[in-house]
Amino acid sequence: MYSIEETLDELLNDLDPILNQFKKYLSSKNIEILNEISSQLFFLARQKEEKLKKIEQDILVRILIDASISINNYILNYRRTLSEVYIEDIYILLNKIAEEIRRGTYASSLRRMINKQKTE
């Protein structure tokens, strides 16, 4: 059995460098950095999929994959259909998730949800 905190900490350890890459992209607008971010997010989702599903958090897998696909769509249509703000929004969302994990509020909320499901 995987512990919630251990699994989320592992995810955070791998997500933080990607968020740092996001910061580099947002200041440089270097599309190669963005392409690398997309690949890293997809790889991270696949790498952590089993553990996240065991703690009933496959939603995080879907978020990471969706972010990766959305970034790829942005790259393919480079600024024709999607605004740069959209990329910033992806960064903000992933950063908020990381902050909630870092503070421990994500794990405590997840525990409350699991406990509530057990009592229903």
Image (spheres, grey):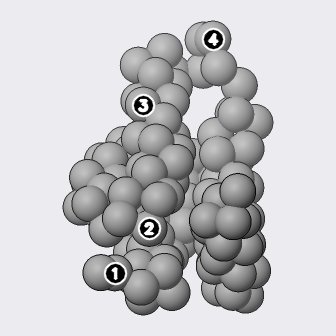
Q: Disc 2 or 3, which lies upstream in sequence? A: 2
CA gap, disc 3 to disc 1? 28 Å
CA gap, disc 2 to disc 3? 24 Å
* Element at label 4: loop
68 w.r.t. 9: above or below: above
Q: Nearer the viewer, mark 1 or mark 4?
A: 1
Q: Nearer the viewer, mark 3 or mark 4?
A: 3
Instruction: Determine contact: label 4, label 2, CB under 8 Å.
Output: no
CA gap, disc 2 to disc 1? 7 Å
Give x and y (percent) for residue 30. Answer: 48, 47
* Quadrant holding the N terminus: bottom left
Give x and y (percent) for residue 16. Answer: 50, 76
Instruction: Determine contact: label 2, label 1, CB under 8 Å.
Output: yes
Question: Which amino acid, by three-letter code, is at mark 3?
Answer: Ile
Q: Nearer the viewer, mark 3 or mark 1?
A: 1
Res. 95 in view:
no
Q: Which residue is mark 3?
A: 69
Give x and y (percent) for residue 55. Answer: 44, 67
Q: Which residue is mark 4?
A: 81
The image quarter containing residue 26 is: bottom right
Q: Which residue is mark 2?
A: 55
* Element at label 3: helix
Asked if residue 41 lies left or right of residue 104, the reply is left
Q: Which residue is mark 1?
A: 2
Q: Nearer the viewer, mark 4 or mark 2?
A: 2
Question: Which amino acid, by three-letter code, is at mark 2?
Answer: Ile
Return the residue nearer the eye: 64 or 87: 64
Q: Disc 4 or 2, which lies upstream in sequence? A: 2
Question: Which amino acid, by three-letter code, is at mark 1?
Answer: Tyr
User: Which residue is painted at 48% across and 35% down in the image?
Assistant: 66
